[in-house]
Image: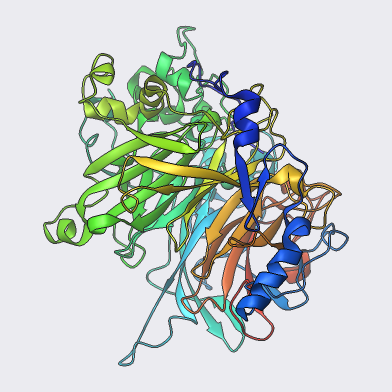
């Protein structure tokens, strides 16, 4: 869809030319406990099922994954399919009022009503349990669902290809952002309920900046306008202190240049971040000067986007904070964990062809920092990953103390605003579109590399050229996530599943559960007419099973569970590509025929753990 997938990385730390066959064939793909050459035609599940069953039987353990998979034949229709052992329901489609008494969905919505309704482009999300009463009950059947609204095309949101007024632009802007909505289970049915905590955050909501770039000249415009809004909210994270992180991905596409004086040309930085005269054809800049790159009053406005934004879901008056220490790039998402010494560590992908994987490590124990009144996300080190061909890797620090960076950038804030350019200079490894990251209980970190049609030369970490279907890489950091070296391996190459019942392409959403399962969601053309899907892998055996398939033209993204893991929430984004002639999902649910992004609630029929 409206993703900016073309590479804007001009640096020549492109695929290494010195790693080729010898290294590729030396690299091993660890699936099913077997080491198999990455270059071979290898079908993980088929090749390993026998050994899996034996090893499980030998240990006398129940297999981790015990459900009947959705067959390819059942995963191609206009309505979702789910394993026969599971069931699903639909929640909060685009346009549903946050307050059940709020404005009903009309198509197209007005700017005023859209600001009080669920946005479009459901993506990353987190369920925050609410415990109430003396016995602190209820967390598994009552909570706040915080949902990112990544994007919606003009054709889908407005029913026309371009806005014709500022009102049209406001509709589009209010459809983006984040929803905080209270949900509650009545019997077996989840519903959105009225709550003072429910709120919408969108492109015109007040924002604060914190960390090294806050107050810097690069965030000031000649107009002096205050920071407003978050946009293209892709994936997400959650902190150990109970807040939500929303990640701004393809922010460049919402800017354009009216270029009335014919003087606007992209600066080096604007080019590296993919800004152009037309952007992604949203046309906001024609009616809202803030998004016009050629408007002299709004110079630097674009530097206010491309950040990770922290939201306190429990406090409806909390102003979201852009945490600048985490760098500015096309943030897909962030997976936070607690590393050695109680330091908080965040892994992040920059989703563009030939862009990088990053890590942030807080300066100190997160609890001590918070006790001192400091945000652990404001003080720490930012690194970019270099994957060596021998299976080792290095985290390269993006610091003004590095003389090479000090020669180009005047202070740490500049490095953070132009993170991509600093990473180019350090020799980071250009990857095949890093999407989600997740940290498994044994400390392994997984990252989806969704695909890269432009790759011409392989390296060990990106061994397919072109990489039509993507792969998943994993690594293990030294010093419990806080060190600067790691060992890595490739977990699975999607192309190797083709021709089997486990077929998938373009892995994107990813979640490692506490038992060693890896949930894999897809966004891109699947084989054999399959719709996009969610599969479950056993990370120790490599076994793979398809749990869910979406509908024509959608992608499956976003994943969160209740504390007991008996309820899972995922999303279908852009069903039918937003086109009612391709899909009316979920019309069967409520009769409205414009396709609407929705949350899907998944439960096991026997009430078991999701994924089992
Ligand atoms: Fe928003 Fe890269 O997916
Ligand atoms: Ca994604
Ligand atoms: Ca994607
Ligand atoms: Ca998407």
Relative placement, left or right, of 3 versus 304 is right
Relative placement, left or right, of 475 versus 3 is left
- Residue at x 74%, y 70% (from the top left corner): 589
The image quadrant where one finds the C terminus is: bottom right
Q: Is residue 12 above or below residue 591?
A: above
All told, the count of numbered labels is: 0
Q: Is residue 47 visible?
A: yes
Q: How is the image coloured?
A: rainbow
Q: Is residue 366 above or below residue 6?
A: below
For this orientation, the residue located farthest to the bottom is 134
Residue 230 location (% of width, % of height): 42, 44
- Residue at x 33%, y 21% (from the top left corner): 297
The image quadrant where one finds the N terminus is: top right
Q: Is residue 121 visible?
A: no
- Residue at x 71%, y 65% (from the top left corner): 51
Residue 597 location (% of width, % of height): 65, 56
Q: Is residue 601 above or below residue 459?
A: below
Relative placement, left or right, of 518 versus 400 is right
> Hey, which quadrant is residue 128 in on the image?
bottom left
> Hey, which quadrant is residue 470 in on the image?
top right
- Residue at x 33%, y 41% (from the top left corner): 326
In this view of the protein, which residue sits in the foreground, 239 or 79? 239
In this view of the protein, which residue sits in the foreground, 66 or 600? 66
Residue 93 location (% of width, % of height): 63, 62
In this view of the protein, which residue sits in the foreground, 397 or 283? 397
Residue 350 location (% of width, % of height): 48, 36
For this orientation, the residue located farthest to the left is 372
> Hey, which quadrant is residue 2 in on the image?
top right
For this orientation, the residue located farthest to the front is 58
């Amino acid at each position: 869809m409206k993703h900016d997938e073309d590479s804007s990385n001009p640096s020549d730390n492109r695929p290494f030319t010195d790693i080729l066959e010898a290294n590729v064939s030396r690299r091993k793909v660890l699936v099913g406990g077997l080491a198999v050459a990455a270059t071979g035609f290898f079908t993980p599940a088929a090749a390993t099922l026998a050994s899996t069953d034996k090893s499980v039987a030998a240990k006398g353990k129940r297999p981790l994954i015990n459900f009947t998979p959705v067959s390819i034949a059942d995963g191609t229709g206009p309505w979702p399919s789910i394993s026969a052992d599971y069931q699903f329901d639909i929640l909060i489609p685009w346009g549903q009022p946050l307050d059940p008494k709020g404005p009903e969905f009309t198509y197209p919505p007005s700017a005023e009503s859209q600001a009080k309704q669920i946005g479009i482009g459901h993506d990353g999300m987190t369920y925050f349990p609410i415990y109430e009463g003396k016995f602190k009950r209820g967390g598994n059947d009552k909570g706040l669902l915080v949902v990112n609204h990544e994007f919606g095309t003009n054709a889908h949101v407005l029913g026309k290809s371009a806005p014709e007024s500022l009102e049209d632009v406001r509709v589009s802007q209010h459809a983006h952002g984040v929803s905080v909505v209270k949900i509650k289970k009545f019997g077996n049915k989840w519903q959105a309920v009225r709550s003072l905590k429910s709120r919408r955050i969108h492109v015109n909501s007040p924002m604060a900046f914190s960390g090294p770039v806050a107050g810097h000249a690069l965030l000031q415009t000649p107009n002096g306008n205050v920071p407003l809004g978050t946009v293209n909210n892709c994936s997400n994270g959650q902190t150990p202190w109970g807040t939500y992180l929303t990640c701004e991905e393809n922010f460049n596409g919402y800017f354009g240049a009216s270029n009335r004086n014919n003087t606007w040309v992209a600066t080096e930085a604007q080019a590296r971040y993919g800004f152009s005269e037309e952007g992604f054809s949203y046309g906001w800049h024609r009616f809202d000067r803030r998004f016009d790159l050629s408007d002299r009053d709004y110079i630097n406005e674009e530097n206010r986007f491309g950040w990770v934004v922290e939201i306190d879901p429990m406090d409806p008056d909390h102003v979201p904070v852009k945490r600048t220490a985490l760098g500015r790039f096309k943030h897909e998402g962030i997976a936070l964990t607690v590393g050695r010494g109680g330091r908080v560590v965040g892994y992040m992908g920059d989703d563009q062809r030939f862009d990088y994987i990053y890590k942030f490590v807080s300066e100190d124990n997160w609890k001590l920092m918070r006790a001192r009144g400091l945000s652990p996300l404001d003080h720490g080190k930012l690194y970019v990953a270099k994957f060596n061909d021998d299976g080792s890797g290095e985290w390269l620090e993006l610091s003004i103390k590095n003389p090479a960076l000090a020669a180009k950038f005047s202070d740490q804030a500049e490095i953070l605003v132009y993170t991509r350019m600093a990473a180019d200079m350090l020799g980071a490894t250009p990857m095949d579109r890093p999407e989600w990251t997740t940290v498994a209980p044994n400390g392994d970190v997984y990252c989806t590399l969704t695909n890269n049609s432009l790759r011409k030369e392989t390296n060990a970490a990106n061994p397919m050229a072109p990489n039509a279907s993507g792969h998943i890489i994993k690594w293990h950091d030294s010093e419990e996530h806080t060190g600067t070296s790691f060992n890595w391996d490739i977990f699975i190459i999607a192309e190797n599943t083709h021709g089997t019942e486990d077929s998938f392409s373009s892995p994107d959403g990813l979640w490692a559960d506490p038992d060693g399962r890896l949930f894999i969601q897809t966004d891109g053309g699947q084989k054999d007419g399959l719709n996009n899907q969610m599969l479950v892998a056993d990370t120790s055996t490599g076994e793979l099973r398809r749990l869910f398939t979406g509908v024509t033209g959608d992608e499956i993204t976003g994943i969160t569970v209740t504390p007991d893991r008996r309820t899972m929430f995922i999303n279908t984004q852009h069903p039918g590509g937003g086109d009612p002639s391709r899909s009316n999902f979920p019309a069967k649910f409520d009769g409205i025929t414009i396709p609407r992004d929705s949350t899907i609630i998944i439960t096991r029929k026997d009430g078991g753990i999701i994924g089992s």
